[in-house]
Image (tube, rainbow, N blue to C red):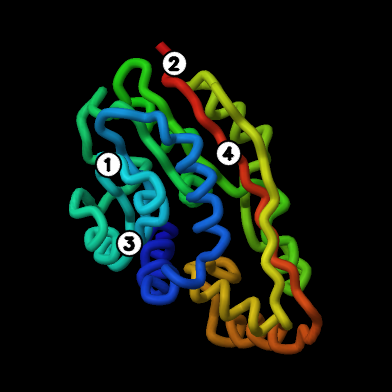
């Protein structure tokens, strides 16, 4: 069910995502600089509408769970396929490199990182960024409870180390300011970020809306993002 919800959420926002996902564009620019020396055939995991492809311009096959996102991606790079990062539709040892911008937090890292390692050739390189614990604090402050299950930076590194040797890693915080809670909520919807847990009733959704509507202060949206360049372990 969670995969279906993610796909639906991003498919609803595919028209607005391209212009509104400002932080994701910023992280794609940084990631493309890290990956500029990569050669051969790559895979763009959770490719979305193609922010990373536009910056990197490498020979890559895009993979995304949202068919609507892929429609836009294919207008930039026709090499794209619908798929799940946790169950990639490729044979072993196919790709020279893999990249992923702002997508892995939607997956079970123990499964997705194993899959990415599987499809990479020996000495394959993986460049990615992932938001980690402490992101979207303002959303949880407005709701008055925990809403997201981000990995901690330590957890992500530990899981990664089972399959890859880290070449470079660093973290950076990104922020966006909004006039009030309602403006923030609209931005979250426009960029495919779900608010509230799965299976909420209409009444619960209305209560969440009211909390954001009644938050009449400047809001600061934050993402703590981990950037990594790593080598597939032998």
Mark 3 element type: loop
Kindly identify which residue carries mark 2: 233
Cβ–Cβ under 8 Å for marks 3 and 4: no
Front of the two marks 4 and 2:
4
Mark closer to the chain start, 4 or 2: 4
Q: What residue is drawn where x is 54% and y is 45%?
A: 30
**Label 3 neighbour load within 10 Å: few <14, some 14-19, many 20+:** many
Q: Nearer the viewer, residue 146 or 126?
A: 126
Label 3 vs label 2: CA separation?
30 Å
Kindly identify which residue carries mark 3: 66
User: In the picture, which quadrant includes the C terminus?
Assistant: top left
Q: What residue is drawn where x is 64% and y is 82%?
A: 183
Mark 1 element type: strand
Mark 2 element type: loop
Kindly identify which residue carries mark 4: 227
Mark number for residue 60?
1
Q: Position of residue 118 (x, y in %)?
A: 33, 26
Front of the two marks 3 and 1:
1
């Amino acid at each position: 069910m969670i995969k279906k919800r993610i796909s639906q959420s991003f498919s609803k926002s595919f028209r607005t995502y391209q212009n509104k996902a400002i932080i994701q564009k910023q992280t794609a620019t940084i990631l493309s600089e890290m990956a500029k020396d990569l050669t051969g055939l790559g895979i763009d995991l959770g490719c979305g509408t193609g922010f990373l492809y536009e910056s990197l311009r490498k020979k890559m096959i895009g993979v995304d769970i949202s068919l609507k996102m892929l429609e836009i991606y294919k207008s930039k790079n026709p090499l794209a396929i619908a798929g799940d990062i946790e169950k990639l539709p490729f044979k072993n040892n196919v790709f020279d490199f893999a990249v992923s911008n702002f997508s892995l937090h939607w997956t079970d890292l123990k499964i997705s990182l194993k899959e990415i390692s599987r499809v990479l050739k020996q000495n394959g390189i993986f460049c990615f960024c992932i938001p980690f614990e402490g992101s979207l604090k303002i959303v949880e402050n407005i709701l008055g409870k925990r809403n997201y299950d981000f990995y901690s930076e330590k957890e992500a590194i530990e899981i990664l180390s089972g399959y890859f040797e880290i070449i470079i890693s660093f973290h950076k915080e990104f922020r966006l300011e909004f006039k009030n809670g309602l403006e923030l909520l609209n931005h979250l919807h426009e960029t495919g970020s779900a608010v509230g847990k799965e299976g909420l009733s209409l009444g619960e959704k209305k209560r969440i809306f009211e909390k954001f509507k009644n938050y009449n202060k400047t809001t600061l949206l934050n993402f703590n993002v981990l950037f990594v360049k790593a080598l597939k372990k032998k």
